[in-house]
Every structure is written in C-alpha cells, then in structure tokens.
Image (cartoon, grey):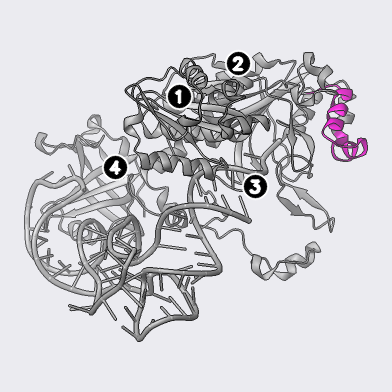
Amino acid sequence: MGDWKRTDYCGVLRAKDIGRSVVLMGWVQSNRDHGGVIFIDLRDREGIIQIVLNPQTNREIHEKASALRDEWVIAVTGRITSRSPETVNPNLPTGEIEVVADGLRILNTSKPLPFLIENDIRVDELLRLKHRYLDLRRPHMKDNIVTRHKAVSATRSYLNREGFIEVETPYLTRSTPEGARDFLVPSRLNPGEFYALPQSPQLLKQTLMISGLDRYYQIVRCFRDEDLRADRQPEFTQIDLEMSYADENDIMSVVEGILKAIFEEAKGVDIPVPFKRMKHEEAMLRYGSDKPDTRFGLELDELTEIFRDSGFQVFSGAIKKGGIVKALKLPGKAGELSRKEIDDLGETAKSLGAKGLAWIRVSGDEWQSPIIKFMSDKEKEDLQKRLGLGDGDIVFFAADTAYIVNMVLSHLRLELGERLGMIDRGRFDFLWVEDFPLLDFDHTEKRYVAMHHPFTSPKEEDLHLLDTEKGKVRSRAYDVVLNGVEIGGGSIRIFQKDIQEKLFHTIGLTAEQAREKFGFLLEALEFGAPPHGGIALGLDRIVMLITGANSIRDVIAFPKTQKGVCPLTGAPSGVEQSQLLELGLKLDVKEKDK
RNA sequence: GGGGACGUAGUUCAGUCCGGUUAGAACGCUGGCCUGUCAAGCCAGAGGUCGCGGGUUCGAGUCCCGUCGUCCCCGCCA
C-alpha cells in the first residue's frame, strides 16, 4: 500500500461524490480490456465501482492494468466523475459514476478461482466449504453474515434496554444425563475425567436467578453430538434468557420484542405482535405437527370415528391397535397430480414408516380410488359430510399410530403446499405453541422422559395427575414457531425442591442419581429460589429464515458437513500419541470405523 | 443404524437405461485482436485417474459387487 491510505469503500460512492479524489482498495471483480480503454470493476465489502483507465491519460498504469486478473488485490487513486447518460449502468448502485484512475498499485495476485465470485453460482457445497474464504466473498454470503451481525446487535440493544444482564457461563462444564449426547473434553489435570461442552446453559442460568441477577441473557454457543440436518449443526448459537418472577406472558412478550427488533434491524420488516397462540393438542390435530407452517391451509381431517368399525381392514385394523385415521385434502388440485406423482407420494409415505397411502380423486360426481370399494355407503356419506369433496379434489389418507399418521401427513402437507405453490415466500408467520405435554413415553427405555427438559414446571392444575396419568400432565412450556420452523423453546421452571425431586423420580432417576447429577441445583433450590422462567431462541435458524437461506450452513461462517467435518480446517483430526498420553487416553478404534 | 439422490475437464452438466471409433457442451483459463464496456466482443488454444477398488466381457464412463465423499429425510436432537 506504501503511503496510500484508503479514503472510501467502493460500494458507497454516489453522484454526490463527483469531483472528489479518492483512494480505493479491493478485489478485481472483472477486467474489461478493450485494447485501448480498460474498465475494472473494483469490489470491496460494500459493493462495486467501475474504474476507467485511459491510455492517453496515463500510459504506465494503463499497461499495468492490462495484466490484472480476477481477484487480484489492488489500490487505485483517482477522481470520481459522472458517466455520460448513455453509459450509466442502472444495475449498479454506483452506476452513475466511475473513477478515472491516475494511480494503480498491485497489492497481491490471485490464482484462477475454483468458482466465480458471483451470487447465483451453482457449485458443489463441499467445494464452497473448502474455499470458504472465497465463498464468503460472494455478496449473498457476505450479506448473510452481516444480517446475522445485525440480528445479534439488535438483540443486545433490546435486552440491554429491558434490563437484562449478559453473563458468560462456562464451556467446560459437567456431563449431565438426559438430553442430547455430550461432546466430551478430557481433563489433563484430572486423568480419566471429562468436561462436557454445554448442550445449553440451562442449569447455570437458573442458578443465576437464584443468585438474584433477576434478568439474564447470553448469546451463547451450544454443543450437541447428534446427527446433522439442514437446520442442525453440532455447534449452534442460542439467544438464551431467563427472568425471575415471570410467567408465560412475560417471557412471550420479551421474545416478541426481541424478534420485532431483529426483523426491523436485520430485514427492515415490521412484524405484528403479539403472535398467535395455539395449544399443542390443536396443532397436532390440525397440522399433525408441533411446529405447523401456518402460511397456508391444507389442514388435516380426523376420521378415526368414521372408520372405527369399517369393513376396510387397513383403517379399522389400525384403529383397533390404538391408531388413528386422518386425511389431507387438496381442493381442486387433482388435475395437478399425475398418477405417477400420486404413486411417488405413496413411496415417500412408506419411506417415513407408513404402510401405504390411500387416496380418493374426484372427477365430476365420480370418486376414483383403489380403496373406495371397501367402504360402506354410510362411510362414504360420513366422509362426504366431513370432507365436503367436490369436483377436482384429491384427498390422501393415512391409518397407523398417531405418530406415523401425523408425521406422514404433515410431511406430505409441506411437500404439496410447496410443490403446488401455495406458500407465500414473502410472509413471516409467527406462532406460539403452548400447553405441551410434560412427559413423553420412551418405548426403548420403557420410561417417561421429559418432553422439554426435567426442570420444566407442570401446570399446577395437572400436578395431581403426576402419579396416575403421567402422559396427561401438561407443562408450562412454549415454543415459538416461524414458517414451520421451531425457532425457540422455553418454560416456566420448577423452583420448589420437592416438586423437582418428584419430577426426577417420575422420569426414573433415583434420589441418589438425582443428587449426584443435579445436586447443586437441588441444594440451590433450598436457599430461597425465586419463581423463574426463560427461553432459548435459535439464532442460526432465525437468520436462515430472514435471509431465505435453505440451510443454517449458509448463515454460519464456518459450518460443518453432515458428517461433522470442517472441510476448510480438516477438523476433526487425529492427534499426537504424546497428547493422548498426557491425557491418559488410549484409543480403541476398530479398523472399520476409521 | 435405515431410506433416497448425486459423484465425468477448473466449474456446471450431457453421455450411463440399451457396453463398441479419438468422452462432448457451456462457462472459466491461456494467447492474439479490439478506445465506452459493465455476463464486453471476435479469433485461436490448452485442459480428463469418468470418486476409488475389484469383478464380468474380446471390449466398461456405461453392467455387477464393495468402498469413500456430498446432500435430503427417518431414527437421534431434554
């Protein structure tokens, strides 16, 4: 750079700057050499501006410029001038002006790139991740990272304003039972013992309430050693908060305030508050999902009672085994699905665990269906009454356990809503789902487990059911859902020691286990714990939805692949024998697992 | 652990169903020409371990088996 000092970002210069002398630094986005005049598009974080080099103006720098290649780093001095009307580029924010160069320095060169630095490239994601520094030069990716920054910044200002105190909690903490698999960190000073990276700061933020912080928040990394998905990374970021003396409404109103601030700051969109609320039971009934996408209709119909004693064994048999029958009707869409597409949907259903997918297509007055012959006239009549089938409708049926039926039909609903263009992409539909069951029966472990986590308070009016009908106890938990994506979940916590002990007992922890794993919490609850509650919001998912990204990988600077690998750094990797020795570790990895 | 899709020039793909001459295209790259382009244009050129290993065959990018990797989903994710 020598003695040159940058005066401006390329992308922010406008007609008001005409006449100014500037020093710009950035990457060569493109170099158009006409033999005479040369045009360079110079790019930095803020955008692109055109540099003009004329052989008559300055022979020496013109020659230097003709050697430039894409992504070389250069410094340019020159004067901002207006472009003549016919050469204005309306596609560039800086298109009314250009820089007539009078100085050029080459700061660095670049090899030819593995892919173009442009927005809509179609290139293998693995290649993008291997060269993430190049991928992040693409404006969309850079914008995603900036949007994330704005979301974090808006969150901090809002919560600071509301009297929340940001507190850091340890990343090296202890492994606890329940929940996800822990990432473990061996302790050199305590051979044979391990820290665990936190799945969330749950217990410590509750402890901070007992400390009297009253309102805590943290924008914090969390770690879960489970399989990855488009919206799940082994490390992810939560907006974590906890409030003393708060009930559900207090938490919800703070969350609505945060999200309103984030959307205003990061997206320039004013979202209406308060959000709609729906009970868990209703969400499952109408959408087959505890995180329904409410941007479109296509609600499910419950048909169990109609087919309880049906001669159609596929339906009545499933019901006799305790299952249910539900339907998904697509009004007037029969013509948009070919027989092959219908069969393919059946295959999709099977891959999700269904035994099949029944359907009825209405053409005029006629019902076309492979199952219609098994139905009695009464059943057809009831079905018509319930579904109101008309010409051009098509309806899909699933009969199985409630779990399978809801999973299959909710997947199908999203798939078809998407495919048939029923989803308004510009819409942000927020929803609170509340009154979750407290407990869920785990068939593998043959015991009840906490649906949210074991510190979630039961509803007071359901407390008496804890001994008798565990599955019916509702909790004071709530999830916030945006466009069918769970972006946060929280609860009012248990703050009385005896109830907490009872909960541990209910999920099969002995008093001894409870004391060993959670002793510090149980003890703290005995020293004047205030009532409290909180929530954690998934920052990655929120930013994914704001930016319209298809996966949270696109809003994380350095994400991991589905196998948990970072293609840029090569993590995870083997370590030196000496490192293992220091930690008292010996590997026992089967050749096949390597 | 299971289901599905994909893997061929630097990149994105075609070719694979139905085996057969020298594996093509576009973009990118290199060189040349070109004084108002902005996806610059025109001419010429270079560029391939068809993911990897094995098998079938006179012959494999194409068929079979295995394996590795990437993506989506189920399980898992309090």
Vertical comparison of A242 with A35: above or below: above
Which is more N-terminal, label 1 or label 4?
Answer: 4
Residue beneath the point at 64% across and 29% down? A319
In the rendered view, does A74 fall on the left or right side of A39? right
Disc number lying in front (4 or 2): 2
- Residue under pointer 4: A48
Q: Quadrant of residue A428?
A: top left
Q: Determine the secondary structure under disc 1.
A: loop
Could you tell me which chain the residue with mark 3 belongs to? Answer: A
Range of residues picked out in magenta: A494-520
Which is more N-terminal, label 3 or label 4?
Answer: 4
Badge 3 amino acid: Glu
Disc number lying in front (4 or 1): 1
- Residue under pointer 1: A298
Q: Quadrant of residue A540?
A: top right
Disc number lying in front (3 or 2): 3
Q: Determine the secondary structure under disc 4.
A: strand
In the rendered view, does A365 fall on the left or right side of A567? left
